[in-house]
Image (cartoon, rainbow, N blue to C red):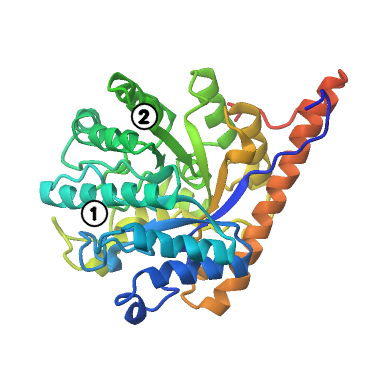
Amino acid sequence: MPAGEFRPRPMRLSILTAALQELTPRARREADPDLAIEEWLAFAAEIGAPNIELSAALHPTEGDIPAAAMLDPVANTLDLRRPFDAARAARVQRAMRATQVGLSDLGYFDNMLAADAAARRRKHALMLKVFDAAVLLGTDAVTGFVGRNFDLSMDGNLVMFEEVFVPLLKAAKARGLTYRVEQCPMPGWTVGDSWHNNIAYAPGPWIALHRICERHGVGDQFRIHYDPSHAILMGQDTRSVFQYLKDAGYSFLIGGFHVKGQVIDARGVSAWGYGGQTVQRGDWHGNEPSRDPAEQLNAWKKQTVFAAHELPGSARHDPLAYLQNRSVDWLDHQLAARELLAIEPDRTYLVVEHEYPPARIQDRERLKPILAASLEFTRAIDAAAAAMYSLQHEVLAAQGIAPQGFGREAYRS
């Protein structure tokens, strides 16, 4: 483009289908699993989502963690108990054309380093099916976790990653796919007292893992699907995270975004600190962990006593919270991504993820205006960031005019 031309480049909006796990009732989808995808595509069109992140998961009858023990139940909108063949893919693609809703990526969020070998084989087998479905549906990315073997040290998990996860990346490479890792630390994934239960939780571990990948020729397959809610949970701010990656020469690692916030409760931090509730959670009885899934859910008090997820736009505008890293400053998030990361904004997906507890409504009509509003908020914030970036870094820069003020700075406290 001509030097100094104003050309804002908005990112591509999407939404994770786990935002409404049971859009299609089980009684209907069990007999016709792809109906769930068709109806989600139609729902996405109604709420103004131009793309979906299609959620896959082990069927509720096959998972190793009961739904009652999950803070955020997963959705198997993409049901892969039956082979996902060309005929099924063609049906989904017809629905995509009819609704004019695209596919950003596929998501399967599970523990790929599970200690139990049989459980790990089930999870890896499903991941390979997800890879194959991604190829048939024409997307180039799958998003998920790395996970952790809770029986090993963190260094021991690096060794295990090299042994059992790298082969998954080689399978992704053979299919022309990228695997994007979400960085949630998953503190309540186990009733144990470990906090980092997904080893790919921050830039330091990302870089260590990527170096392992490079040794095996799959560095280009390992990318991060950055979610700022998890940075807030760990006391980080997005601009500093991105600046660290740039300083370390890894600004290319982030390949996509989950758009979900976190609102820190100052009272909870005062009571327990950022490690969350450590005693009397209700997930143990004496020296024995509870076997009741509903009581195992209390393990998530390591997180929920001091924080709650935000659906973008649902939290009050609070500049002080932004400055204290107690909520996501969405405008600066979108500016920092453009200023510090090696991304092409108009080829990068912003995937709205809904985990705000009071609004996790399994009612299509009640949830529809909530998601529509959040999507519009995300679209508007990103449009503002795209305009600011183009004005400051292209238009004014081409004319030798400096932008005003200083803005948020990395590494400041």
Q: Residues within 10 Å of mark 1 (few under 14, many from 20)?
A: many
Task: Tell me the kind of residue under disc 1.
Answer: Val
Pick the front one: 280 or 183: 183
Q: Nearer the viewer, residue 190 or 213?
A: 213
Which residue does the image show at 20% across and 46% down from the upper left? Answer: 114
Determine the secondary structure under disc 1: loop
Mark 2 or mark 1, earlier in chain: 1
Percent across and percent down for residue 215 are: 29, 19
* Quadrant holding the N terminus: top right
Q: Quadrant of residue 32?
A: bottom left
State left or right for residue 160 relative to residue 246.
left
Q: Are marks 2 and 1 in contact (CB under 8 Å)?
A: no
Residue at 58% from the left image edge and 31% from the top image edge: 343
How many angstroms separate mark 2 from mark 1 (CA)?
A: 23 Å
Which residue in the protein does label 2 denote?
205
From where the camera sits, is residue 174 visible?
Answer: yes
- Neighbor class of circle 2 (other Cα within 10 Å; few <14, some 14-19, many 20+) is some
- The numbered disc on residue 191 is 1
Q: Is residue 94 above or below residue 329?
A: below
Q: Residue at x 46, y 75 (%)?
A: 362
- Residue type, label 2: Pro
Which residue is painted at 50% across and 66% down in the image? 95
Residue 242 rendering spot, x and y as whole percentages: 55, 30
- Please give left or right for residue 186 compared with residue 260 in the image: left
Q: Position of residue 210 (x, y in %)?
A: 36, 26
- Determine which quarter of the picture holds residue 77: bottom left
Q: Nearer the viewer, mark 2 or mark 1?
A: 2
SS type, badge 2 = helix
* Res. 74 in view: no
